[in-house]
């Protein structure tokens, strides 16, 4: 039902914009289509990546390693996977949603996504070249600790 409300709101607002200033509305639509064209290859990659992950790892496997019942072990696995994975946020969130629908736990997925966004094991050498050893390593340690805190907060909020 929410999606229907958003579609109706978008159509109504588009119509208002169109009648108010057709030229600007056309420019906005063209700009939006250009942005969509730019992101489409990455979006298709996201869909393929999600399909491959779900084909390789069935719901039982996902639940066994990062399911809600895996506790601390699952959280550590999720944090490790997130720390070494190098994918952008717009890929991570749909992937997280699919993993949740296929048996992953909320705390584990929140840990995965937060460590994915904040910790960069793969990018650590580049980070060291810019910031130095101590700063880069400390930033990643603090980011990992904060990703656990953020995940606990997210899981708590979802549980309310």
Image (cartoon, grey):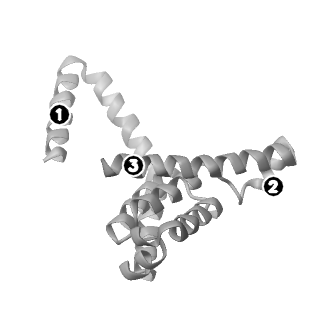
Task: Please name which of the two marks, 3 or 1, marks the residue nearer to the observer.
Answer: 3
Along the line of sight, the residue nearer the viewer: 54 or 67: 67
Label 3 close to label 1 by CB (< 8 Å): no
CA gap between label 3 and label 1 equals 32 Å
Label 2 packing within 10 angstroms: few (<14), some (14-19), many (20+): some
| 57 sits left or right of 117 in the view | left
- Coordinates of residue 160 in the picture (x, y in percent): 30, 47
Residue at position x 43%, y 81% in the image: 61
- State left or right for residue 121 relative to residue 2: right
Labels 3, 2: front one:
3
Could you tell me how far apart the alpha carbons at marks 2 and 1 are, in whole angstroms? Answer: 47 Å
Q: Which residue is mark 3?
A: 156
Query: Please, what secondary structure does the residue beneath circle 3 have?
Result: helix
Query: Pointer 2: what residue?
Result: 125
Q: Secondary structure at mark 2?
A: helix
Give the image location of residue 56, x and y in percent. 45, 82
**Of 118 and 153, which appears nearest the observer?**
153
Q: Secondary structure at mark 1?
A: helix
The answer to whether residue 130 shows anywhere in this view is: no
Residue lying at 58% horizontally and 65% vertically, measured from the top left: 76
Reading the image, the residue beneath label 1 is 9
Residue at 14 percent of width and 40 percent of height: 5
């Amino acid at each position: 039902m929410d999606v229907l409300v958003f579609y109706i709101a978008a159509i109504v607002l588009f119509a208002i914009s169109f009648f108010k200033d057709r030229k600007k509305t056309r420019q906005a639509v063209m700009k939006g289509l250009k942005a969509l064209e730019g992101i489409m290859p990455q979006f298709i990659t996201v869909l393929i990546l999600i399909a491959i992950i779900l084909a390789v790892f069935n719901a039982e496997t996902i639940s066994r390693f990062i399911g809600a019942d895996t506790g601390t072990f699952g959280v550590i696995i999720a944090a490790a996977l997130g720390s070494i994975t190098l994918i952008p946020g717009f890929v991570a969130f749909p992937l997280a949603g699919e993993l949740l629908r296929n048996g992953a736990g909320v705390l584990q997925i929140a840990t995965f996504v937060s460590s994915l966004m904040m910790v960069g094991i793969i990018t650590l050498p580049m980070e060291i070249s810019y910031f130095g050893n101590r700063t880069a390593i400390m930033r990643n340690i603090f980011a990992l600790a904060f990703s656990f805190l953020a995940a606990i907060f997210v899981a708590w909020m979802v549980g309310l």
